[in-house]
Image: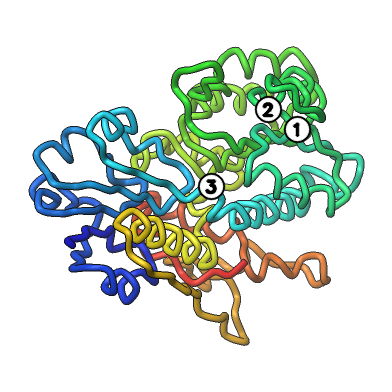
């Protein structure tokens, strides 16, 4: 069996080589010519799996080592009889950790209080949104849960988007990217959304760690400029890696699509992808993929972090702030704002981070 694997997927090489002949390529080199003789692909979000890539190949199976799968043309794959899978929930804890870091930094900036006076609107309550809700409740925050598909199915405990826009101090998005269907999420935070915010005095913080296209970039910039939105924390961007420099400079926290990039989440995604591939081809293989431990003196320093930046993001003493030593979105923000051209490099060379 011939397997083409995105070379940025960590911890995968020794396990994948138990299954078949593996070729590890950067996403930019996973081309129609490269995959023509492949039986299976294991990719990430930078590889668009559609007719232009796969036509004429012998590929039978595609796994993406990610939660999101909008880069897979699933209709084409289904028509061609090419099996596919994603890794739902693989990095949900990592994204919740990211939101935790965002909330701590917002509190340090004086933009919210970590108590019952703060309301968090969580839009999308799947694997990630559920963990974010649990986190916020442990912090003593009030939460409003908004999930139109689950609400339509008659599930209880969900609030309409209108309530979230009127009452939330922070609105955080955890939805898949859906351009069509009953519940499209493409630009769900667009002109209409921000105009509604202008009609009330809440002026929330917007957090997007779902998909960049969920938030309309020009609309958000206008809302930041006119005060309808108090601040923005952005991890996922439209047109990655060619992100909006205007939004980059306006965002209080700006990270290079790394919310789900903990070593734990990556190891889980690698394990899920390999097991799905083995199952598809009828192989009796199991995999124990473990990330390395943190060194005793560990302090989170993303790729390119310079010690001279340390004065910009001090971590106060006290137990409640210790999580920022393990993951601190402000450190990524400082690097990205100084070096926006390094967006893709920061992702592909992301350092060890444990949950």
Q: Secondary structure at mark 3?
A: strand
Residue to which mark 3 is pinned: 254
Asked if the residue at tag 1 contacts the one at tag 2, i.e. Cβ–Cβ closer than 8 Å, the answer is: no
Badge 2 or badge 1: first in the primary sequence: 1
Instruction: Judge by depth and name the residue closer to the eye, 45 or 301.
Output: 45
Proximity of marks 3 and 2: CB atoms separated by less than 8 Å: no
Q: Earlier in the sequence, mark 1 or mark 3?
A: 1
Cα separation between marks 1 and 3: 24 Å
Q: Quadrant of residue 295?
A: bottom right
Residue that carries the numbered disc 2 in the rendered image? 150
Question: Badge 3 local density, few (<14 within 10 Å), some, or many (20+)?
Answer: many
Q: Position of residue 53 (x, y in %)?
A: 17, 40
Task: Give residue 354's position: percent from left, percent from top.
Answer: 58, 70
Q: Which residue is mark 1?
A: 145
Q: Is residue 239 visible?
A: yes
Residue at the image position 50 percent from the left and 74 percent from the top: 291
Q: Quadrant for the N terminus, please.
A: bottom left
Density class for disc 1 (Cα within 10 Å; few <14, some 14-19, many ≥20) is many
- Tell me, for residue 276, which label it has, or none: none
**Residue 187 location (% of width, % of height):** 51, 22
Q: Classify residue 56 as left or right of residue 223.
A: left
- Quadrant where the C terminus sits is bottom right
Q: Secondary structure at mark 1?
A: strand
> Which residue lies at the image location 66% right of the left edge and 70% below the top edge?
325
Sooner in the amino-acid sequence: mark 3 or mark 2: 2
């Amino acid at each position: 069996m011939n397997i083409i694997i995105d070379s940025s997927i960590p911890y995968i090489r020794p396990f994948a080589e138990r299954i078949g002949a593996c070729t590890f390529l950067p996403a930019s080199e996973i081309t129609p010519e490269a995959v023509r003789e492949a039986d299976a692909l294991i990719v990430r979000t930078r590889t668009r799996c559609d007719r232009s890539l796969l036509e004429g190949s012998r590929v039978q199976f595609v796994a993406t080592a990610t939660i999101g799968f909008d880069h897979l043309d699933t209709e084409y794959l289904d028509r061609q009889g090419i099996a596919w899978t994603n890794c739902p929930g693989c990095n949900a804890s990592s994204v919740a950790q990211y939101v935790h870091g965002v909330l701590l930094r917002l509190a340090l900036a004086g933009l919210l209080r970590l108590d019952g006076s703060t309301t968090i609107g969580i839009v999308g309550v799947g694997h990630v949104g559920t963990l974010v809700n649990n986190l916020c409740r442990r912090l003593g925050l009030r939460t409003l849960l908004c999930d139109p598909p689950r609400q339509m199915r008659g599930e209880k405990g969900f609030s309409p988007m209108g309530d979230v826009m009127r009452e939330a101090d922070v609105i955080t998005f955890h939805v898949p990217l859906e351009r069509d269907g009953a519940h499209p999420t493409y630009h769900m935070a667009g002109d209409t959304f921000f105009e509604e915010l202008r009609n009330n005095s809440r002026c929330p913080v917007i957090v997007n760690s779902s998909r960049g296209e969920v938030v309309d970039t020009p609309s958000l910039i206008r809302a930041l400029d006119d005060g309808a939105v108090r601040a923005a924390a952005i991890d996922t961007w439209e047109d990655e890696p060619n992100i909006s420099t205007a939004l980059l400079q306006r965002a209080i926290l700006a990270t290079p699509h790394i919310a789900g990039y903990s070593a734990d989440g990556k190891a889980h995604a690698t394990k899920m992808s390999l097991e799905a591939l083995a199952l598809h081809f009828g192989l009796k293989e199991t995999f124990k993929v473990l990330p390395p431990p943190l060194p005793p003196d560990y302090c989170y320093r993303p790729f390119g972090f310079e010690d001279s930046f340390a004065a910009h993001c001090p971590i106060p003493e006290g137990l409640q702030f210790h999580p920022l030593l393990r993951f601190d979105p402000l450190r990524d923000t400082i690097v990205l704002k100084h070096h926006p051209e390094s967006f893709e490099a920061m992702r592909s060379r992301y350092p060890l981070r444990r949950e």
